[in-house]
Image: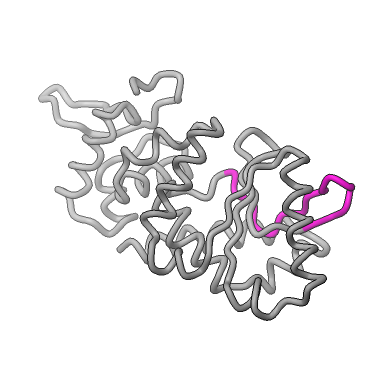
Amino acid sequence: MSDMLFQKAYDEWMSRVIRHSQGERKRRLMEMDSYNEQLLLKNLWWPALGSFDHLHPEWEVSDFKDGQRFVDFAYMPFGLHRGLILEADAYGTHLRDVSRFRFGDNLERQNHLLMDGWHMLRFSRDDLLEKPKRCQQTLLAALSAWAYGAGSEAPQLTLYERAILHWIGRHNSEIKPVEIMAALKIGFTQASVNLQSLESKGYLRSTRSAQGKAMSYLVLPKTQRIN
């Protein structure tokens, strides 16, 4: 179920990103390293946050010397300016097989980006495969420490809860439990339990019948949430 939710969200997101890209970035997106970068998304980003909002793959940045660089992912929840850079590094690609010049250039690139105000997290392919929970904890701790606003929310939500919020957010309308059942291919009990949990956490507000039965749900704006 989790793989299916990820793949569906990933395909929709990448299709949208490619459609709105051009030039060198679009070429890079079309040829993107499907293993390392999808691994970062599948084992790190999606389990921790459950959404690709404000995340930009193959993002072009200007470094400290006004050189143009591409990074694996840039997370910019506050608009198109400085944010968090995330990269997935395979041992063979980034160490064993690079020239001395390329190795030094990679270090200089990172230093310039940090001096220019970017935050950066880099994860090895081995850790993403073997220690994904630790990587997720590092990401959430960094988001909290650097005041990106996502670190305190994400651990409270289950996979189904994040999937429900993602689906409701895309449709931007009041929804019924039966619609969640159809969209996520889950039973009535699973849908009801997670919708009620989201309401208790302050993410949703239900509309109820005269008998008190929840008929539909609407996402609450952040300013109205209780947590």
Horizontal and vertical percent for residue 224? 40, 19
Horizontal and vertical percent for residue 107? 74, 58
Residue range (magenta): 54-69
The image quadrant where one finds the C terminus is top left
Horizontal and vertical percent for residue 128? 45, 64
> Which residue is at the far left?
211
- In this view, the residue in front, 197 or 169, is 197
Dividing the picture into quadrants, the one containing residue 221 is: top left
Residue sitting at 32 percent across and 26 percent down? Answer: 202
Relative to 3, is 21 above or below? above
Relative to 144, is 15 above or below? below
Residue sitting at 44 percent across and 46 percent down? Answer: 49
Magenta-drawn stretch contains 140: no
147 relative to 62 in the view: left or right: left
Relative to 137, is 39 above or below? below
Dividing the picture into quadrants, the one containing residue 35 is: bottom right
155 relative to 192 in the view: left or right: right
The image quadrant where one finds the N terminus is bottom left
Residue sitting at 75 percent across and 62 percent down? Answer: 106
143 relative to 78 in the view: left or right: left
* Secondary structure predominantly adopted by residues drawn in magenta: strand
Q: Look at the image and name its color scheme.
A: one colour
